[in-house]
Image (spheres, helix red, strand yellow):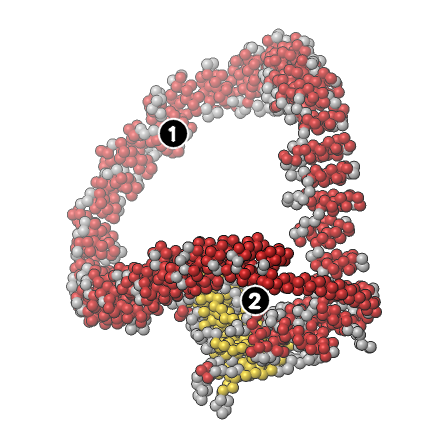
Amino acid sequence: MAAPPVTVKEVVSLTSSGINPQNISFTNLTMESEKFICVRETGAANSVVIVDMAQPMTPMKRPITADSALMNPAAKVIALKATVAGTAQDHLQIFNIDTKSKMKSHQMPESVVYWRWISPSLMGIVTNTAVYHWSMEGDSEPQKMFDRTGNLNGCQIIAYRASQDMKWFSVVGIAAGDPSRPGLIKGKMQLFSKELGRSQELDAHACAFSTHQVTGNSVKSQVIAFAQKTVMPDGNVASKLHVIELGAQAGQTPFQKRQAELFFPPEFMDDFPVNMSISEKYGVIYVVTKMGLLFVYDLETATAIYRNKVSNDPVFLACDSPSTGGIYAVNRRGQVLLLNLNEPAVVPFISGQLNNVSLALQVAVRGGLPGAESLVKPKFEQLFAAGDIKGAAECAADSPKGILRNPETIARFKAIPAQPGAAPPLLQYFGICLQRGTLNKVEGVELARLVLAQNKKQLLDTWMAEDKIECSEELGDLLQSVDADMALRVYIKAKANTKVVAALAARGEFEKMGKYCEMADYKPDYSYLLQSTLMSNPQGAVTIALQVSKMNPPPLDYNTVADLFLQRNMIREATSFLLDVLKEDREDQAAMQTKVLEINLVTFPNVADAILGQGKLTHYDRPRIAQLCEKAGLYMRALEHYTEVSDLKRCCVNTHSIDPQALLEWFGTLSREWALECIKELLVSNPRQNLQIIVNVCKEYTEQIGADAILKLLEEHNSSEGMFFYLGALVATSTEPDHHQKYIEAAAKTGQIKEVERITRESEHYDPEKAKVFLMEAKLPDARPLINVCDRFDMVDDLTTFLYQNKMLRYIEGYVQKVNPSNTPVVVGALLDLECDEDFVQNLILSVRSLLPVGPLVEEVSKRNRLKMLTPFLENLVAEGSTNADVHNALGMILIDSNTNPEHFLTTNEYYDSKVVGKYCEKRDPNLACVAYKRGNCDIELVNVTNKNSLFKLQSRYVVERMDADLWEHVLAEDNPHRRQLIDQVVSTALPESKNPEQVSVTVKAFMTAEMPQELIELLEKIVIQNSAFSNNPNLQNLLILTAIKADTTRVMDYINRLDAFNGPEVGEIAVGNELYEEAFAIFKKFDLHVDAMKVLLENLENLERGEEYANKVDLPEVWSQLAKAYLSQDLVSAAVAAYIKAKYTDDYLAVIDVAKRADDFDSMVKYLAMVRKKVKEPKVDSELCYAYAKTDKLAELEEFITQPNAAKLDNVGDRCFDEGLYEAAKVLFSTCSNWGRLASTLVKLHKFSEAVDAARKANNTRTWKEICFACVDEGEFRLAQLCALNIIVNADELEEISEYYQVRGRYEELLSLMEAGVGLERAHMGIFTELGILYAKFKPEKLMEHLKLFSTRINIPKLIRACEEMHAWKELSFLYIAYDEYDNAAGVMMAHPDAWEHVGFKDVCVKVANLEIYYKALEFYLVSHPTQLNDLLTVLTPRIDHSRVVALMRQANHLPLIKPYLQAVQNTNMVAVNDAVNELCLEEEDFESLRTSIDTYDNFDQMTLANKCEKHELLEFRRIAGFLYQKNHKWTKSVELSKKDGLYKDAMEAAAQSGDKDIAGDLLQFFIEQENKECFAAMLYNCYDLLKPDEVLEIAWMKGLMEYAMPYMIQVMKDYTNKVDVLVEDKKDRNKEKAEQEKEKVEQQMNQNMYAQLLPAALPAPGMETTGGMNNPGMYSQMGGVQPGMYGGY
């Protein structure tokens, strides 16, 4: 049977991908392209599932709630639509799934009824009134394109399409059928032209846009195809397919309008098209109907090609598949079907079954389909024979897959002579081929020969640029001599790698050559290429060599390449190559590294130096290179490579040829010992020349070599200059005193006096004593270095002595005048000790004058009792206006010593230092000392001197007048042994004499601070009580009382009664603080501070009786309120309320409420709150009053209060009453505030259940319903309980609690009744159905299966599965597993529990399991439990199981014969195990016919094992089979022997003939001769004709007398030899004839050389067209029939 022209393949099963079948519908599923399917899942948790067609079994699920979801046809971008709550508007959003970001959003002003992606960047949106386009680019909003026409009103929009050029658009909708034919859905379409701005109304169910290339047109025509199915006025149904052109262009051949019948079978009369697609690949129209019919039509002719039903389930969605040329269709079952042309069968189907050869050819040409060869060749021959050259050329040019475009066709056109005035046939053929597209290789070469012969290469340029000629190596060879550049381009396009490399090498473009080889993955013969390039282009050879080196592995050895360069003395080239290959610096390249350095050190030392300087080579022979470097004069490189100190010492002395900086750096690489050796060598060889280098090395590497070692080396060679220069750098960082000392000595020895002066002045690290001794011994002409040392380190005495003794007085004057005037006193002292002339000293002092520190000078001079000599100097300073304290101190001392009116000086001079002068006077005159101390406020010094000399009166007056707290603290300190004498003088003398209140105050405070209360009382009584100026001072009275409070409480009451000016409130508070409550009460009472007095009575004395007595006495509200608070604090509520009422005080109502509640005195609370409510309007007051009414059971007063205006929070009060069991009061309160929930709870407590249900109905909240329900269950009111529970279980979260409550109390029947009623609710959810199933499983298992079958889609299957497992409901459990697509578990349950097994159901489950192991468990289960039905199960599982494993399983169980039908059914798989099993069964059953059939049909089995078994079988036929098997395995000898043994001579002869072995044939022939079997001898000659030698046969026949049996054989031999001779003769004749034809062809070719011009009109483009060549021609795709941009709606 012929294969159908259309293939139907299920590519995806959405249900297998986890999609709920309920969501597979037109409203929930979208498929915008062949890449993605998008499904909206609705239910308890909304989500969007995205199925990637490349990975359909791993869908992507996102928790998204939307009314519609569309995946972008090209990228992972999703568009979502959702209705804005409370409006008729839709909100649109576009998200990028990969980046998880929102790209765009917009709120449409009206509802969107349909939308889709019309390109990857443009979305079409259809509303009730108009059509919009929304671009992905920028921030643009949807743009209105056109309004909808009236024919779409009331239609459901199912499609919106756009043409590729975005100039034509169509909207398709469907509506209910006419009353005369209600089953047939009507289809309406609106066609809109963007350019014309007009719409056309049409009747159509589906449409599609496409383009078609009309023959002769340069531009494709825009066409639309649409299908309509309408009811005619006579009641008949007309189904039509229309194909028309849109916007025909002037100058173009119009597309002829086509119309065809859509034939629907009678059973599909109400069916209608739901989708139409046009395949650009094949040029056919696909029409899919709702009931699963597929129509295929040719686009150009609208001819029907095929019609068939492709789906048993309704199809609701389809989309194009540009990659395959077919379409995808989705049906209600969730199957995604790929409908496509069956390429090998289409053309034979059209030409054979449809008998439409022309259509078959068109389809084959358009789609490049096979099967048209047998059609096009006869047509070509017919046209050619008829002389229709053009027609034949067009036929050949358009032949499918170019089957006629071959050398034979070209030769036939060349053989036709040209007609006068007409182009040669060959040129006509080429012209037509160029119009069609590109010439193939053979055609291109042939045309190039014609053009080049006439020197018209520019035509080839044009065709090459337009990619009209297929490039080939032959074409490149043809162009090589004419245009090398063009030839190279041809070679490249033809991928003639050898020719490309040769051409690029010849041109010297080696970089391009390397890139090309890498790109083309081509490896040329680099050895030959390199040698040939060396002679002509050495640098190019280097480039090639470098390219070779970069290859891995390199095709040439590096040494070989380098030797090629060196053999031709190409040192530089060899160096360049070697350096490049050695850049990785590998150890295995050490020899090459040495080689490149050697050749350059001998020839180009500077190059070698540069190479070594780069440091990129590290593995060469270093000793060898070191020697060569030394010979070449590269001493620095030699030093870097030598490893022996003798070599280093020899080289390093060549400093004249070594860069100093390099030599300096080299020293850094040496060890300490070697460095010292080299430095010593430099010192010995030429110390003067090498001094700078030595110093620099020592400076740079002091840390490595060691400063001490360097200094020792320099000292040994008496290099003072080296010491000076080296230490000059070292002392800047060194802290070693010895280094600095040696530097001073070196500088002095080299005459560097200025440096000696500098270092002695700046350095901090030399030993000053050593330096001083060295400088004194050196006796430098300049004493400044010595001055620096002695000045800095306080050795001025030694300096002065040295300078004075060495007659260097000038340096003494310079030192004190310019260097350090502050040391003048020391210098003066030293000079005085040296008995220097006094005039010199005075002059020295006067020369310094104001710069001289007077204090130290006075000290130095006074030590030597020469103070008077300073009088002139001091007087001069005073005369100059000096205010220096030292100057005036010295003058004062001189006056005191001379007793020249010192009191006047001490009291009038304001510049001297009181402490200094006072101290000077203490031993001379204490009174003068006191005068000096008093003048300078020297408190401590004055106190000490007065204590020491018992001047306490003087001290007391000074302390009182001083008014200093610190001084008072000092003198009144406990450790002061003179404190009592001072206090006596203060009390008796100082204070009585004082008239200054501040002095008194400070004194009192000082006593207080010193904590001397008794002394303070004594002091204050003398001031306050005894008549004085301060008797009525309030502060002092306060202080007296307070001091008594602290020190002597017995005097307090007396002071209170005697004094009147003190501060009563403050003193009273202090008395309270010191627990003197009676004194405090007396003070408050004395000053009429009633509140404070009451506070003392109540809080401190805690005497409520005295308090009540005092309140009655003063009768003040604030006093009563205090008393009320006191009562309240004692929980005396009644007394407190009475006091509050007298006080009319309402602020404490919160406290009263709390205490009253605590004391349970609500009657008093009612009285108080009634008074408070008159003044305070607070919710708290009214609420507590209500609560008090409730507590006192005053319900009448409560109801009356509630009816009046109030601010009470009745809900809160009601809650409190409810919590405390005051249910009647709570009922009143909840009824008043309409709190139905709490009222219902209250009624429950009152056992008024009916009223409670009514209240709960008004409350309508879950908590209330639950409370009443539970109460009714507990009370047995199950009818009311069910009413409540039905309002609860609609909330899924509460269902489990209700069920558990019933079950705990054993109310199973009532619970089942409740759940059964619940499933009928409008708001019934999955939880109710699930819970009812669980209850059935527990309590009524007989109802469970019926429940599952009715509500399987509304049950939480996993939860119910657990329940069934617990209750051992195995049959129901297997049903649930099947419904949940858990086929593995379902199969397991059926096998584990026989009561759940049912054969047909088990087969259905088995084919759907995912775990392959279950198949084999099922087989074992059937083998044990249901062996008779095992083959039926195997039949179902055949496509899924491993047949080898099944055989092994059955063989192990020894039940292989049981599955023989299965084995025979699957033997077509030709598996070893299956074939062996079948053959074994046939052998056991002695069925040789079946065995022979099996062996002949299926060869994949253990043939030798079977042959051995059959060879030993007792039946002859089985032994024949053994011989046959030996033949198949080329065991010819054994097969022949077996056949001879059984007398099966025919089989033996056939085996010998098939073996092709002359020896076997000869042996068998000899056997027949020995057996004298003449007939077999003759038959042997016939069967083994080719294996026997005629001469041997003739000899045997003659010798054995068998000539008559051998004669037929000999006759045939003679015939064969005669035929061979005849063939040789004919071959000779053919060669001669071919040679003659070639000569004739050359002559004809010469005649046609000038005929090329006739080719131009038919094939060339307009002159002057710019071309770029290759595949960059913008029009190329269109010319080649390729894919146009935007095809398939932009997919």
The residue tagged 2 is 323
- Give me the residue at 60% from left, 13% from top: 769
Disc 1 residue type?
Answer: Ser
Please tell me whether residue 410 is drawn above or below residue 1034 in the rendered image: below
Would residue 1382 appear left or right of 1591 to someone viewing this image?
left
- Give me the residue at 35% from left, 55% from top: 1452
Please tell me whether residue 1024 is drawn above or below residue 1222 in the rendered image: above
Disc 2 residue type?
Answer: Ser
Q: Closest to the observer: 1550 or 821? A: 1550
Quarter of the figure that contains the C terminus: bottom right
Q: Position of residue 368 (x, y in %)?
A: 62, 70
Q: Position of residue 871 (x, y in %)?
A: 59, 15
Where is residue 1351, by image quadrant? bottom left
Would residue 652 appear left or right of 1345 to someone viewing this image?
right
Crowd rating for badge 2 (residues with CA inside 10 Å; few <14, some 14–19, many 20+)? few
The residue tagged 1 is 994
Mark 2 in CB contact with mark 1 (< 8 angstroms): no
Where is residue 729, by image quadrant? top right
Please tell me whether residue 1562 is drawn above or below residue 1497 in the rendered image: above
Of badges 2 and 1, nearer the viewer stands: 2
- Give me the residue at 38% from left, 32% from top: 1002
